[in-house]
Amino acid sequence: LGGMGYFSGSVQLKRKDADAHKLMGFSSQLFSATPSRSFFPRGFAWDEGFHELLVQRWNSALAGDVLSHWMHTLHSHASKDGGCPGGWLPREQVLGESAIRRVPQEFLAQDVTVTNPPTLLLLLETLSSKTAGARPDWLSTTLVPALYPRAKAWLEWMLYSQRSPVSNSSAMTFQWRGRDPHEEKLMPTTFASGLDDYPRALFPSQDEEHLDLLCWIAHGASLLSRIAAQLQESARNPDEAKRYAVDAEGFLLLKQTLLESLEAVHWSEKDQAYFDRGLTFGMPRRKPKEGASTAKPGIATFGTDVVIGCGSPNGKHTLQVAVPYDYRGDAQQEQDKAERRGCPD
């Protein structure tokens, strides 16, 4: 609770067709917890869903107030051709001068193609329940119906904008945006996922299909299906009840489709486990000629090897492991050129 604060201002936006220092979102206010008021004085969408699941056990009205603030920062970013439905929620909300002063320059602007796991939907479902503990009636009868259209728009934007470029009609797969193949780390970070340094494909490319993002969207569809079913029961008229019934059925079918994709794409019969898909070890290896790049999309090309010493703390027993270091493929350039399915980039 000591980390909660009230912030006011506009989020800096990052788009390929605009200067990040000039492109700003609408003026908004945010009542939110923070990871740390002194070091991270800003709201994080991924964190906040978990923060408020705890807060609501103590004060559900307070958690509902926070949720309302977050959902009212949803931005509409329809493309010129109208091909990007739903709404984008800024992953980090850096609002006001005091917050801006504490944030490194490279993290100020929020990329409009990047999202976070929809943990706030977990809170919305919890507050929609009329039986889970003693909480004010207005949360389930007024707040949840008011926020449901925004939650629906948020998930629709994820479903549309985060599709993997290699996804097809037979299997829906998804990809966290924002990974940098030229980041000077052995394992490029995936800030969007919330699990920054979780092991993934060593070489970010358009070929990636991320298991956890598919699971988040499938779970989000399941949550909204249940919420819509609850709202149907308390609908004010037959037309409203019918709309909620259509949503409940539609999100349930979406969940089933995504679970089928999970099995078809991410399940490994050999390893009896689910995995991401992307470029990593085991891909074709070629050494380019000195001073020339011969990389092709889908082929991991390696330059200098880095030797890592793995062993005991005293260094007496060390195993030298050579790992590829330099990757200069064309996959990222191809990804940059790839059409974003109508969503702004």
Image (spheres, rainbow, N blue to C red):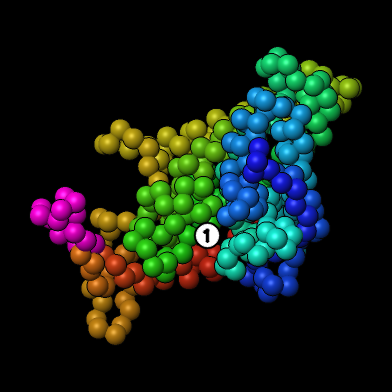
Point out the stretch of residues depicted in magenta: 308-323
- Residue at the far left in the pictured view: 316
Judge whether residue 258 is colored magenta: no
**Looking at this view, is 58 or 274 the one in front?**
58
Q: Residue at x 53, y 68 (%)?
A: 336
**Looking at this view, is 39 or 108 the one in front?**
39
The location of residue 270, given as percent across then percent down, is 26, 36
Above or below 93: residue 144: above
Mark 1 lies on a secondary structure that is: loop
Above or below 245: residue 192: below
Above or below 275: residue 295: below
Asked if residue 251 shows in the view, the reply is no
- Residue at the far right in the pictured view: 237
Circle 1 sits on which residue? 178
**Amino acid bearing label 1:** Gly
Quarter holding the C terminus?
Answer: bottom right
